[in-house]
């Protein structure tokens, strides 16, 4: 069987090249087995039951309805860290652009011409004095793949860094240098920072994280940067805070009609992860993750299913997606025992309301396999059963 991968958005060719043509087609079938996407809004783009997996080349997955994917037995992946360096470098640029009038002075310099161009530009430069980042305080909200890199880069620029991440993973906590102090409360970070940069996912809980009250806690000269997601900063509140000089500047990757005409707001068109390198990294990681899942059933970097890996040593592997309720393993193995099928190896893992079971066994006839799949699918809590043959 060939798998068809449907792509949305621009996916780097280096990623698509990971799919061998003898096993895969790309955009050839209206019932694809997997989707490879970037920012495509899957809340509005229906995906059918044929879709076993969705890989998001990138970090944020708020564009994918995860509960719907669970109910459909669709495993959703992202590519952690694949574009983190790209975002970090853009943040460094935006910090510098917030302190030095690079754009305005360069535009002015282009207008000065004539025999005394050098004298005139030298004379005018005093209108374009900036400040330095060295010694200033930056608050980094979210210390994951992006935030931890931003914190390190800011420290390297000589800034005093304060981090805030009550949910930090053990992996990121280990990687974070000890000389980056962490605030217990968001308010502590906001009150002390000259620059505040946000690197967290958009979730119901994080919606409007920065609102009127938080903006009032910031310094009047502070710069707020949002390269995470639209909706984490309340736009009405930020426009009001800028008008009342409660903060100095807002720099964001997410445009909207609320903010477009505001001179104190700098908008980029969601380009944080848009570098050649990041696009290749993300597409390759996403393609490798999809191949692993489609061909072996193993799950890594999923955002709605548990991580599950087991060496594929037997000829046949059954994978079952089911609800996370008691005695599922008992009911599944009883069916196999009744069919006189011997299990070589098995694994079961759960995450919230879903669970995943893989069973390795000897090859069996096509008829017996069809019968077995029917029996397993007849368990009401079973959502999807796949049979994979070792290659
Ligand atoms: N502008 C762009 O093109 C890009 C935007 N992003 C956005 O940045 C977000 C972060 O990306 P990564 O660092 O790669 O993700 P990540 O998952 O590695 O890190 C996110 C961190 O935020 C923390 N967090 C969650 N809620 C928090 C809260 N209320 N307060 C403080 N910390 C909180 C988590 O504990 C985690 O450590 C993504 O979810 C995405 O929305 C990511 C890449 C590119
Ligand atoms: O360029 C993209 O695909 C968006 C990157 C992004 O926002 C993310 O990775 O969360």
Image (cartoon, rainbow, N blue to C red):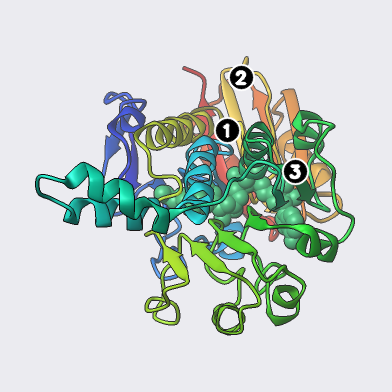
**Residue 187, picture quadrant:** bottom right
Q: Is mark 3 within 8 Å of ligand 1?
A: no
Horizontal arrangement in the rendering, residue 99 relative to residue 205 (left or right): left
| Frontmost residue, 221 versus 211 | 221
**Residue 151, picture quadrant:** top right
Q: Residue at x 61, y 78 (%)?
A: 245
Q: Residue at x 74, y 74 (%)?
A: 214
Q: Earlier in the sequence, mark 1 or mark 2?
A: 1
Q: Residue at x 77, y 33 (%)?
A: 176
- Does dot 3 land on a helix, a strand or a loop? strand
Q: Are marks 1 and 2 in contact (CB under 8 Å)?
A: yes
Q: Residue at x 27, y 48 (%)?
A: 121
Marking on residue 160: 3
- Image quadrant holding the N terminus, namely top left
Marking on residue 312: 2
Within 10 Å of the Cα at label 1, are there few (<14), some (14-19), or many (20+) other Cα atoms? many
- For the question of whether residue 9 can be seen, the reply is no
């Amino acid at each position: 069987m060939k798998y068809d991968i449907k792509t949305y958005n621009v996916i780097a060719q280096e990623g698509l090249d990971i799919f061998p043509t003898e096993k895969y087609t790309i955009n050839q079938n209206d019932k694809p087995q997997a989707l490879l996407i970037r920012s495509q809004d899957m809340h509005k783009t229906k995906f059918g039951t044929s879709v076993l997996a969705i890989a998001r080349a990138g970090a944020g997955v708020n564009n994918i309805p995860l509960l719907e994917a669970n109910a459909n037995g669709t495993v959703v992946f992202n590519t952690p860290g694949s574009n983190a360096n790209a975002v970090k470098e853009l943040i460094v640029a935006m910090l510098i652009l917030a302190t030095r009038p690079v754009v305005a002075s360069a535009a002015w310099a282009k207008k000065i011409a004539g025999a005394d161009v050098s004298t005139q530009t030298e004379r005018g430069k005093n209108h374009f004095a900036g400040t330095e980042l060295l010694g200033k305080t930056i608050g980094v909200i979210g210390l994951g793949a992006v935030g931890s890199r931003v914190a390190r880069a800011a420290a390297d620029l000589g800034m005093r860094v304060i981090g805030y991440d009550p949910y930090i993973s053990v992996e990121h906590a280990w990687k974070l240098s000890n000389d980056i102090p962490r605030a217990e409360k968001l308010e502590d970070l906001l009150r002390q920072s000259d620059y505040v940069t946000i690197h967290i996912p958009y979730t119901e809980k994080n919606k409007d994280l920065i609102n009127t009250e938080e903006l009032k806690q910031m310094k009047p000269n502070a710069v707020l940067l949002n390269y995470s997601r639209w909706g984490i900063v309340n736009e009405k509140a930020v426009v009001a805070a800028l008008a009342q000089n409660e903060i100095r500047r807002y720099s964001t990757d997410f445009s909207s009609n609320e903010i477009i005409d505001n001179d104190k707001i700098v908008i980029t068109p969601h380009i944080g992860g848009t570098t050649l390198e990041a696009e290749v990294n993300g597409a390759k990681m996403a393609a490798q993750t999809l191949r692993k899942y489609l061909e072996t059933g193993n799950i890594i970097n999923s955002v709605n299913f548990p991580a599950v890996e087991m060496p594929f040593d037997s000829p046949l592997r059954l994978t079952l997606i089911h609800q996370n309720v008691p005695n599922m393993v008992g009911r599944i193995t009883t069916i196999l025992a009744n069919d006189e099928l011997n299990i070589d190896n098995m694994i079961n893992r759960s995450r919230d309301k879903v669970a995943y079971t893989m069973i390795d066994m000897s090859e069996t006839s096509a008829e017996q396999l069809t019968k077995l799949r029917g029996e397993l699918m007849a368990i009401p809590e079973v959502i999807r059963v796949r049979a994979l043959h070792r290659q």
